[in-house]
Image (cartoon, grey):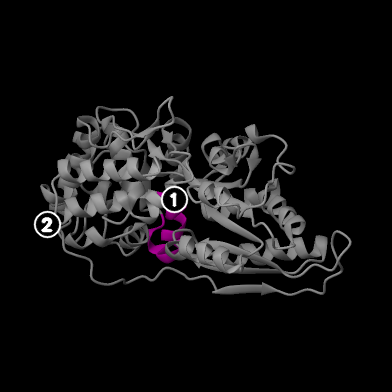
Amino acid sequence: MARSRTHKHVPLPAAAVALTLAVTSCGFGGSDPDTLQVWIMQGTNPDETAFFEEANAAFTEETGIAVEVEFVPWQDAHDKISTSIAGGTTPDVAELGNTFTPGFADAGALHDLSGYVDDTSQYIPGLMEMGELDEGVYGVPWYASIRSVVYRSDLFEEHGLEVPENWAELRETALALSEAEEDMTAFPVPGDAQYSVMPWIWGGGGEIAVQGSDGTWDSTIDTAEGRAGIEFFTGLALEDGVSSTGAVNWNEIDVMEAVADEEAAMAILGSANPKAILEANPDLEGRIDSFTLPGQDGGHMPSFAGGSLLSVFEGTGNEETAQRYVEHLTGDEFSARWAEETGFFPGTVEGVETFSAAADPVLQPFAVQLSEASRGLPVAPEWSQVESEKVIVAMQQDILNGNATVDEATEAAAADIERILNGG
């Protein structure tokens, strides 16, 4: 088995904890507005500081409104936002993961933006669905993210390896890399990265949860089809030894850093990760590439279409100003710049097409994954509880730690998902 990663050699860049652009206010909407408070998530994307310096300066020049951006680590985001809602200390605008939005909207914490969003069909459907509740719009798609496989193209060339086109070839490739590169993790199987697990559930033919005509949610993770994919993925670690023992505790940031540190040969990562990896380790320029997640018997395996929405909080008194800021960031100029600088895809259908045509070749497989093999999650306010209870993470870690068999772990996960989504 590949060695366990014990420390980081190439630290990823950290954006400033807070970025404040204070400008004399000349008023907006007939009043003297307070400084706009904005929370932006931080973690797997490249350093955002320079982008927001320019975007906020342009907004301030246009409106006279000062903007203060606070970068919040993704792993702390849900709890921090929940605490701010309970304490009445919410920001005016926040970037919300698309799975966060239904729950916060259902709780009445978000301002309805339907008066601003004239045509929801312009946005990527899976993202827009997560921002809609009843007749309201509570989040505007900002950018999309999809997960495929990033790999060391130089090592593939050195060892005469081809891009795998099905599960069997993926396993053979991982085994070959593990044997040839003894000091590297060939293919990390992380325990704390639920979006790296979901493709295998779908790839085997299972469903995380589907809603019946009577409104009841049913999970088929514990069917033979759902178990097939999970058994294959965890088997790469437990039976084939192509992962690291320490990866049972790795999240997506740990996996990304393993690639940046030249300690992993290929890994499931997001579309913004290649740029972040090269930012951390420029020596990898020209030595990494990507491929879509291969299907069990060929084709493409579905991957979670994630991304972020921009939401405005209710009751701050700055709703009109905040809505205008959302329009500013999601407009053509700054959404295109964000895509170019981060590797994320724009949140609109047209934006994805335009960006993909001119994107770095490393991102082309991600664009294919997004357009041809992407999936969403249950659009249910309770889904955030599934994530906060780490149901899928617990399932994965129980299997990897040997605390449960695939059958036992999937049965428990399916029961928990159904209990939560069905209000039990």
For this rendering, which residue is in front, 312 or 38? 312
Residue 243 on the magenta segment: no
| Residue 422 horizontal/vertical position (percent) | 39, 40
Residue 404 visible, this orientation = yes
Indicate the secondary structure of the residue bearing disc 1.
Answer: helix
Left or right of residue 69, residue 292 in this image: left
For this rendering, which residue is in front, 296 or 251? 251
For this rendering, which residue is in front, 262 or 416? 416
| Residue 327 horizontal/vertical position (percent) | 71, 50
In this view, the residue farthest toward the front is 424
Task: Examine the rendered structure and indicate whether residue 253 appears above or below residue 123.
Answer: below
| Figure quadrant of the C terminus | top left
Other residues around mark 2 within 10 Å, as few (<14) / some (14–19) / many (≥20) = some
Magenta range is 270-285
Q: Amino acid at mark 2?
A: Met
Q: Tell me how far mark 2 sits from mark 1, CA to CA.
A: 35 Å
Task: Examine the rendered structure and indicate whether residue 273 appears above or below residue 292.
Answer: below
What count of labels does the image hold? 2
Residue drawn at x 12%, y 54% is 402
Residue drawn at x 23%, y 66% is 5
Left or right of residue 324, residue 354 in this image: left
Q: Give the mark nearer the N terminus: 2 vs 1.
A: 2
Residue drawn at x 23%, y 39% is 170
In this view, the residue farthest toward the right is 30
| Residue 379 horizontal/vertical position (percent) | 48, 39
Q: Mark 2 = which residue? A: 1
Q: Which mark is residue 384?
A: 1
Q: Amino acid at mark 1?
A: Ser
